[in-house]
Image (cartoon, grey):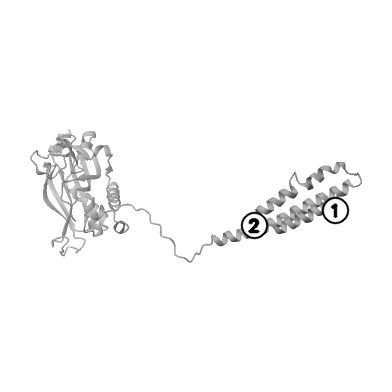
Amino acid sequence: MEQKILDIKNNALSEIEKAASIKDLEEVKNKYLSRSSELNNMKKSLKDLDPQMRPKIGALTNEVSKFLEEQLQVKYDEFYKIELNQKLQSEKIDVTLDGTYNPIGRVHPLTQTQNEIVEIFEHLGFSLIENQYSPEVEVEKYNFDLLNVPKEHPARDVQDTYYTHLAPNVILRSQTSNAQVRQMQNSRPPIKIISPGRVYRNESVSARKNNLFHQIEGLYVDKDVNFGHLKGVLNEFIRLYFGSARPTRFRNSFFPFTEPSAEIDVQCIMCQGKGCSVCSGSGWLEILGSGMVDPNVLSAVGIDPDVYSGFAFGMGIERLAMLKYAIDDIRLFFNNDERFLKQF
């Protein structure tokens, strides 16, 4: 039996040396060291041996088992190192190579501009109102009637306003001023709000005009509000938005919902007031419309014009973005051209 154990040892060693993979080693281990192996069966039969031979054979089987386990582990370690080196070579990264460009999305320049405008007016004490006061599908009552726009006003014509098939008086809003009326109907002064959103005009699309664009409206109603407050707020907005104080001028204008009304020009960004093609040689660029809320508008929403007064203003977000970033075509905002969008 002693020779048989040594033969098992030698045969196992030979197979360990010939193993070409971890899988081969597993087969050798199962063959010589498993519970059903010949060596393990010899351990189980020790009780049947001559008592004088039992200690020697028992010690030898244990010695051979331990020796084979050690040799298997040595071989396992060799294969592990080989596989590890192969893996390291295959996954090696050359840190001197140029990185791979992975394009990511960006915040649209109109969204950036709107966020910036909202942040400035919130800094000036205005609150951003909820969408429920500013629906894009609107009725004429809130888009025109309560804003003191006469029935015969050209803005109501189908050549200027989009009418829907939902009902004769249902339109796509042509201005965000509907938010002002709804806010005044649902709250009492003091009111100091801004409302951005999309508006629709039946315009021919060109470099300067689009039939869909974005506006932001502002409204301040309280006791003793005057035109000086309007000028102060808007001049401060212009300073903060353009990064420095710029010359402005207030020109007389007319809007049905404000009296007096004014359009505000800022010194041309391109030529610094000297005159160029962008400002048509005038040195000025119009940026927004404004005025004191007409008493008829206050009365229509149940606010006493003898007690309260207010001012309102509205500006095109595309126009402000075009002026700030020297963009000469409004259509660029809607073409989804990455070459344009990635500049912001």
Compute the Cα span from label 1 to label 2.
34 Å
Q: Nearer the viewer, residue 305 or 328?
A: 328
What kind of element bears circle 1?
A: helix
Question: Is residue 307 at all visible to an observer of this figure?
Answer: no
Image quadrant where one finds the C terminus: bottom left
Q: Amino acid at mark 1?
A: Gln
Describe residue 114's horizontal placement relative to residue 254 as left or right: right
Q: Which residue is mark 1?
A: 3
Image mark for residue 275:
none
Image mark for residue 80:
2
Residue 135 location, x and y as percent?
24, 39
Residue 99 location, x and y as percent?
44, 62
Is the C-beta separation of discs 1 and 2 under 8 Å? no
Residue that sits furthest to the left in the current view: 152
Rendered residue at 9%/44% (across/down): 154
Earlier-in-chain disc, 1 versus 2: 1
Q: Nearer the viewer, residue 28 or 138?
A: 28
